[in-house]
Image: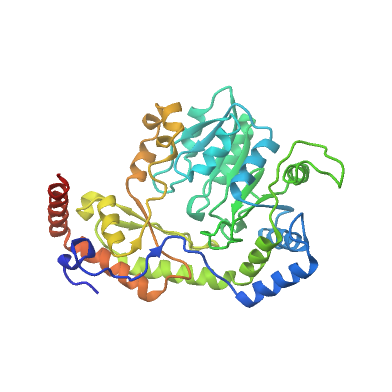
Amino acid sequence: MKSRGEDLAIFGGPPAFSEALHVGRPNVFDRARFLDRVNKMLDRRWLTNDGPLVQEFEQRLADICAIDHCIAVCNATLGLELLIRACGLTGEVIVPSFTFVATVHALQTQSIVPHFCDIGRDTHSIDPRRIERSLTSRTSAILAVHLWGRIHDVEILADLAARHGLTLLFDAAHAFGCSYQGVSAGGFGRAEVFSFHATKFLNTFEGGAIATNDGDLAGRLRLMRNFGFRDFDSVVSLGTNAKMSEVSAAMGLTALESLDRVVACNRANHEQYAELLNNLPGVKLLAYDETESCNYQYVVVEIDERGVGLNRDELMRILWAENVLARRYFFPGCHRMEPYRALYPEAPDRLPVTEQVCSRVLQLPTGTAVGPDEVAVIGSILRLVVDEAPKVKRLLEKESRDSEVTSVP
């Protein structure tokens, strides 16, 4: 443990960790179970095209989420694109900017205008109060996001969508295993899209799934994910190749068997962070509703520069020097990324909360690659930096000046 600001790695001290601690380092599950499934798959010589492992995985997901239909896809981005197309969306869609850029790309690539709506200060999710003032005659849907797996305002959003004749969809990339008022994610709105990317707590290497209780919509999606084929020789609709492979489903099934262990690890890490960061000036750990199911896969802190004495980016530089690769999710906001920055230059004026949150959020490492010892060290670094913030600030400024001098030719 480091005891003085001068000991920090950014000022020449040894890093706290010899190997980098990543945010979203993949969870690895029971290798023997996974390899057994893979060997049986190879014996069957059925590697893709809606094989038995994909079918079993889809059924398990549907059972867990208590929904009628679950359509596995090769990644969540294509899942969003297929869903948007299958729902016949056109014109404009209300969407938050504070999300992974794939949410917005799925609209823009289909010539649908993403109308950015601001978020709630405490929820980080789309603010229903701001949606109605964003509606136009061209609005066809609301695409909301269950950010951090915290599900908010689904009844308000459903009522708003119904009153205005809009389709309500959810990007549920973070929300598998989470609930709202005891109801599991997957059945809200017309459909929801899960991500099983390698960085998610449940991964299929790469993959996703579309969850819905709409049988007609599910049927269209199954056609669309397989080139529009109804049977061996009959193509009855436009489609693409968005199928999940058997090996990905094998990983997913194995992951489901370890789900309780992974969630328990995530929860323990989050609770330890909460204890270590409790009452630390300027550092606010986002909490989860203890009455709901949750996957605890994100440890999100907000950094208030006035309270800490350092801004979020300075704190991140300090952590990175210690091999703690904290991340600025989802900086700088989709509206400040291309092509949206050029297409919608007025967006920042409509998104004051998004702008503020983008400058404050920091994601800390968790998952099965992180345990009590690692969390303790990260917590001690954060507390040291805050306790000695004026000194650390001066040292950072000196380091910056010295770097400028040495860089002059």
| Residue 323 in sight from this viewpoint | yes
* Vertical relation: 110 (above or below) 245: above
Instruction: Judge left or right: residue 83 versus residue 399.
Output: right
Name the outermost residue toward the front: 409
Residue at 77% x, 43% y is 223
Between 385 and 8, the one nearer to me in the picture: 8
Between 168 and 297, the one nearer to me in the picture: 297
Between 37 and 58, the one nearer to me in the picture: 37
Instruction: Judge left or right: residue 349 versus residue 315.
Output: right
Viewport quadrant of the C terminus: top left
Provide residue 191's location: percent of width, then percent of height: 66, 45
Provide residue 403's location: percent of width, then percent of height: 16, 51
Name the outermost residue toward the bottom: 32
Provide residue 345's location: percent of width, then percent of height: 40, 27
Viewport quadrant of the N terminus: bottom left
Residue at 48% x, 28% y is 133
| Residue 344 in sight from this viewpoint | no
* Vertical relation: 340 (above or below) 379: above
Q: Image quarter for residue 63?
A: bottom right
* Vertical relation: 106 (above or below) 196: above
Instruction: Judge left or right: residue 49 versus residue 110.
Output: right
Between 192 and 188, the one nearer to me in the picture: 192
Residue at 22% x, 72% y is 2
Residue at 33% x, 42% y is 356
Q: Image quarter for residue 142?
A: top right
Provide residue 59's location: percent of width, then percent of height: 74, 60
